[in-house]
Amino acid sequence: MKRILPLLLSTLVLASCTSGSGFKPTPELQALADCTGISLEKLGAIYGEILDLMDSIGGVIPPGDTYDIANGNYTITVSFGSIAGVVSSSDSLIDGLGVGESATATWALNGGLAGAAQVTGEGTFTVARPSASIFNVSGSGATTDGTCQFDFSGLNFSTVVGGGPVGTITFTMTSPDGTINGTMTFNGGTVARVVATYNGDTVVFNIDLITYAVSF
């Protein structure tokens, strides 16, 4: 199944549309929403790189990555830092992730690349394959990108072969502009919809997963 997981699960990168509500956010809320889009972009990049590595185990490791089959240790170089962690599984991954198998990757992001934004973070992703056409993904962690602190306590969704992800990411975004708590919903289509609480009020916005721009 080489290269299948990244192709299927990278459907996080899709086009979006606006909510068309006419709602005008305050500058502070707009900044927090923009932070959420920026953070999702980084999380998506980390997620994609780790899945790419996991899918390549037993075959050709992607250029710039390292993997030690004896202990599962790996490193990945990305444009905004370097990722290191351990892939572990009670199943044999020598031929990739088979039906009925699962694997967990811990990760830590060091944003110390020269000339790159100082993005840091850590977390885990667990990928399970209950059938030939379905992949279930769960995870948690946090990233910091400048003043944007993104904590996701629950990432849970499924991806079916030929379709987009269906599920949610529960998160808290904190910056000097305040805090929002919310849930991103992926429905297998082309919209990442966010319903969040800000200063006691419910706010709704979409994230364009091509540009990661936000629209209310």
Image: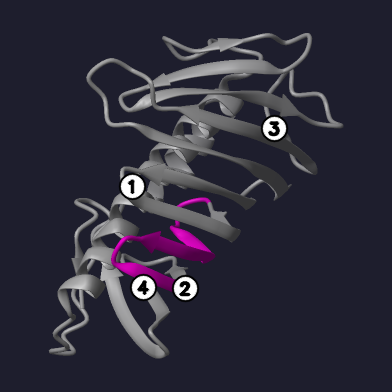
- Alpha carbon of mark 2 to alpha carbon of mark 3: how far? 34 Å
**Image quarter for residue 31?**
bottom left
Verify CB contact (< 8 Å) between mark 2 and mark 3. no
| Marks 3 and 1, the one that precedes in the sequence | 1
Is 58 left, or right, of 42 in this rendering? right
- Residue 180 image point, x, y percent: 41, 72
Residue 130 part of the magenta-drawn span: no
Q: Which residue is mark 4?
A: 193
The magenta region covers 161-181
- Alpha carbon of mark 4 to alpha carbon of mark 2: how far? 14 Å
Q: Which residue is mark 3?
A: 97
Is 124 left, or right, of 166 in this rendering? right
- Alpha carbon of mark 3 to alpha carbon of mark 4: how far? 30 Å
Q: How is the image coloured?
A: one colour
- Which residue type carries mark 3? Leu
Mark 4 nearby-residue class (10 Å; few <14, some 14–19, many ≥20): many
Nearest to the observer: residue 97 or residue 118: 118
Nearest to the observer: residue 126 or residue 129: 126
Q: Which residue is mark 2?
A: 181
Mark 1 nearby-residue class (10 Å; few <14, some 14–19, many ≥20): many
- Residue 112 image point, x, y percent: 38, 20
- Which residue type carries mark 4? Arg
Q: Main secondary structure of the magenta part?
A: strand
Quadrant where the image shows the N terminus: top right
| Marks 4 and 1, the one that precedes in the sequence | 1
Residue at x-position 28% and y-position 76%: 205
**Closer to viewer: mark 4 or mark 2:** 2
